[in-house]
Image (spheres, helix red, strand yellow):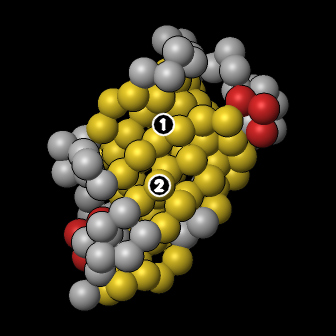
Amino acid sequence: QVQLVESGGGLVQAGGSLRLSCAASRSIASIPTMGWYRQGPGKQRELVATITSGDSTNYADSVKGRFTISRDNAKNTVYLQMNGLKPEDTDVYYCKAHSSWWDYWGLGTRVTVSS
């Protein structure tokens, strides 16, 4: 089992940057995949970015070139650097840890981008 706590959300103007952090309650080195997802009102939760234990990354097309996911195993933390933010990036962002047979979610951090 692992508890995940997201932080770093807030209000930012379009074109600005934020860095989200996801702190895990135990070592993440052996967790196969860590990811960031987002969900807005009335919308399905969607993938933003994932990173594997081997540091392979995957991004949604809508954030490629603007967002960067990274992991610091020594700090048991996963980051999402978000640059060039747009109003359509406004959502609650969730951290997820998962393997082939289990997954755990954080409670989310809200990001609001004003135009």
* Residue 50 position by quadrant: top left
The amino acid marked with disc number 2 is: Gln
Q: Is residue 98 above or below residue 87?
A: above
Q: Is residue 110 above or below residue 3?
A: below
> Disc 1 versus disc 2: distance between alpha carbons?
13 Å
* Residue 84 position by quadrant: bottom left
Q: Residue at x 36, y 85 (%)?
A: 13
* Residue 89: x %, y % from top left: 30, 66
Dot 1 crowding, Cα within 10 Å, few <14, some 14–19, many 20+? many
Q: Residue furthest top?
A: 100
Relative side of 8 to 5, left or right: left
Dot 2 crowding, Cα within 10 Å, few <14, some 14–19, many 20+? some
Indicate which disc, 1 or 2, sits on the residue closer to the N terminus.
1
Q: Residue at x 64, y 62 (%)?
A: 7
Q: Is residue 2 visible?
A: no
Relative side of 15 to 34, left or right: left
User: Which residue has dot 2 on it?
Assistant: 81
